[in-house]
C-alpha cells in the first residue's frame, strides 16, 4: 500500500479516508450506540417490549466492552503504526510485540486497531438477532464485518495500521460477543447455550 501510493502515505489526510471514514465513521458508530441505549431505555418503560430488553442490553455491553478492550490494549502493547516506521517514511525502527524497546523511544499506541473496533464491535448484531429474529443474524454479522472492513482498510491506506492489527481487533470483538452471549443465554435459560452451539459452529465455518 505504501509503494502503491508512491512511497508515501498520500491518503493519510485525504478527505475520504480521514474525514469521512475515520472521523464521521467514528461518530456514526458512537451515535448508533447511543441510539441502542435510547431504545433500551424506551423498552424498559414499555411492558410490551420486555423481550427486547435483554438483547438490547447485550448489544450495548458487547459493543462497549469490545471497543474499550481494543482501545485499552493499545496503550499496553507498545506497538508503532506503519507511518512511524523508517521503512514506511517514519523515523523509528521496528520492534516486535515482545521485543525490548529503548527507554527513550516514545510509546507506540497502534495495536490492536482502535478505529476498526468501532466497526467490528457490531459483529455482536449476529447474537442480538439470534435472540430476537434468528433469520436476520447473518445480516447482522455482515453489518459488523462490512463496517469493520471499511474502517480497517481505510486506516491501512492511511498508514495507521497493519492488516494484522485489524485481524486481532476482529478476534477480540468476536470472542467478546460470543462469551457475553453464552453468559447471558445461560443466565436466562441454560438450554439456550446448548441449542445455540450448532449455529455457532456454522458461523465459525
Image (spheres, rainbow, N blue to C red):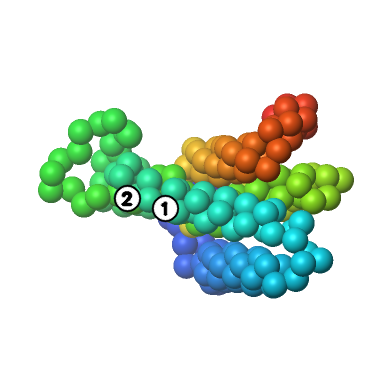
Residue 104 placement, left or right of 106: left
Up the image or down, 71 lies above or below 182; here it is below
Mark 1 secondary-structure assignment: helix
The residue drawn where x is 57% and y is 50% is 62
Q: From this viewpoint, which residue is outermost toward the front?
A: 47
Q: CA distance from mark 1 to mark 2?
A: 7 Å
Percent coordinates x, y for residue 92 in the rendering: 26, 46
The residue drawn where x is 59% and y is 39% is 183
Percent coordinates x, y for residue 180 in the rendering: 58, 42
The C terminus lies in which quarter of the figure?
top right
Query: Is residue 135 visible in the rendered structure shown here?
Result: yes
Cβ–Cβ under 8 Å for marks 1 and 2: yes
Can you identify the residue that label 1 sits on? Answer: 71
Percent coordinates x, y for residue 156 in the rendering: 51, 50
Tag of residue 75 = 2
Query: Is residue 20 visible in the rendered structure shown here?
Result: no
Residue 109 placement, left or right of 8: left
Mark 2 secondary-structure assignment: helix
The residue drawn where x is 68% and y is 67% is 44
Up the image or down, 166 lies above or below 21; here it is above
Amino acid at each position: 500500500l505504501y509503494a502503491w501510493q508512491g512511497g508515501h502515505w498520500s491518503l493519510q489526510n485525504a478527505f475520504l479516508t480521514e474525514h469521512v471514514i475515520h472521523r464521521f465513521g467514528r461518530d456514526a458508530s458512537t451515535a448508533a450506540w447511543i441510539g441502542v441505549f435510547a431504545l433500551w431505555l424506551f423498552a424498559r418503560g414499555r411492558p410490551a417490549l420486555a423481550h427486547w430488553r435483554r438483547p438490547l442490553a447485550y448489544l450495548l455491553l458487547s459493543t462497549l466492552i469490545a471497543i474499550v478492550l481494543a482501545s485499552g490494549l493499545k496503550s499496553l502493547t507498545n506497538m508503532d503504526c506503519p507511518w512511524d516506521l523508517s521503512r514506511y517514511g517514519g523515523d523509528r525502527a521496528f520492534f516486535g510485540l515482545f521485543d525490548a524497546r529503548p527507554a527513550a523511544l516514545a510509546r507506540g499506541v497502534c495495536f490492536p486497531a482502535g478505529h476498526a473496533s468501532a466497526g467490528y464491535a457490531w459483529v455482536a448484531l449476529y447474537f442480538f438477532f439470534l435472540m430476537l429474529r434468528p433469520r436476520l443474524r447473518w445480516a447482522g454479522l455482515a453489518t459488523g464485518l462490512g463496517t469493520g472492513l471499511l474502517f480497517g482498510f481505510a486506516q491501512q491506506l492511511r498508514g495507521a495500521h497493519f492488516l494484522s492489527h485489524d485481524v486481532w481487533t476482529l478476534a477480540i470483538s468476536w470472542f467478546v460477543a460470543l462469551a457475553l452471549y453464552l453468559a447471558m443465554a445461560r443466565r436466562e435459560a441454560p438450554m439456550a447455550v446448548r441449542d445455540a452451539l450448532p449455529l455457532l459452529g456454522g458461523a465459525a465455518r
